[in-house]
Image (cartoon, rainbow, N blue to C red):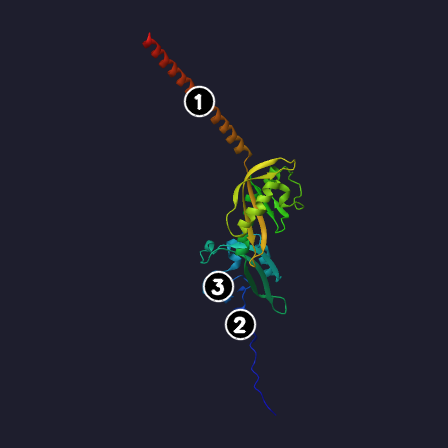
Amino acid sequence: MDHHKIKKINKNQISEDIMEQMPLAIQVFAPDGQSISANKAWELLWGESRDYLSDYNILKDPQFINSPLFKNYLKAFEKGEVIYAGEFFYDPSKINKPGRSRWLDINLYPIKDKDGKVLEVVQTLDDITDTKDAKTMRDRFKIMIENSTDFISIATVNEEIIYLNEAGKKIIGLSEDDDVTSMEIKDFHPDWAYKALKEDAIPKLMKGEVALGETALLRADGHEVPVFASGVINKLPNGEIDFIGIIARDMTEIKKINDELKNKIKQSEKTNKYMVDRELRMIDLKEQLKKKNKEN
């Protein structure tokens, strides 16, 4: 009979190895909230050694105690419930610990004995800082667009409008509630302006060149609105067009002021010419009188 030596499996060691190799940051706590251990991913998350956790107690951390999430922690530690704690902005400097502040997505997993008594609580931390920052930037950008007084539109590669800000709707004579998703770029451009956009501006943008200048938008009532416009084409990594953006500033008032200024300059030039001509005539008359007096 062939005998094989059977190595006894150390379940605790396997658990520790799995925890250490997990890509998700993991921290383990005693039932009283005292930190017991953390994995390599936790060190990478905070950029610090896990050794500094020796005096850390999560149930005494003022950032958690004073947050709405704390009741979820109590459910996990006191009642042994598996809990999705939620999203939380954590700043280590507030407890005099190293590491930069981050947005975290937190889950709590109590480990219990056969009688249901909590032995440890495992906390997983998913760093969502970049995602939150990106969302914050999108929200700020959206606020900026919505509060802009400029016409701002976004269209598909087929020139179908997918977005037009409130100011843009006002400029072309639409109400705030009007649906623009059935419109196309040509619908709010006079024929001559749309032709210039198709034949000049868009080809320039496709080549990465700047395309801006004076053009016009077309109001719902058929009137043209003079604008100074620029465009942008966003491309996907494969080179395909993602969207076409148009930003235009209403030049109606500026044009009006310029026209009034031109008229004033023109009138002033006429007045100056009249005064100069009058002065020249007076000089000529004086010269003739002088000549006459000499002859007499």
Judged from the image, the secondary structure of the residue bearing numbered disc 3 is: helix
Q: Classify 10 Å Cα crowding around label 3: few (below 14), some (14-19), many (20 and above).
A: some
State which quadrant residue 292 falls in. Answer: top left
Amino acid type at image mark 2:
Asp
Decide: marks 2, 3 in contact (CB < 8 A)? no
Q: Which residue is mark 2?
A: 17
Mark whose residue sits in front, 1 or 2: 1
In the rendering, at what x and y percent does residue 83 appear?
61, 60
Horizontal relation, residue 161 to residue 136: left or right: right
Residue 1, placed above or below residue 261: below
Residue 214, placed above or below residue 49: above
Q: Classify 10 Å Cα crowding around label 2: few (below 14), some (14-19), many (20 and above).
A: few
Q: Which mark is residue 44?
A: 3
Judged from the image, the secondary structure of the residue bearing numbered disc 1 is: helix
Mark whose residue sits in front, 2 or 3: 3
Image quadrant holding the C terminus, namely top left
Q: Which of these two is toward me, 239 or 15?
A: 239
Q: Which residue is mark 1?
A: 273
Q: Which of these two is toward me, 57 or 228?
A: 228
Q: Which of these two is toward me, 194 or 163?
A: 194
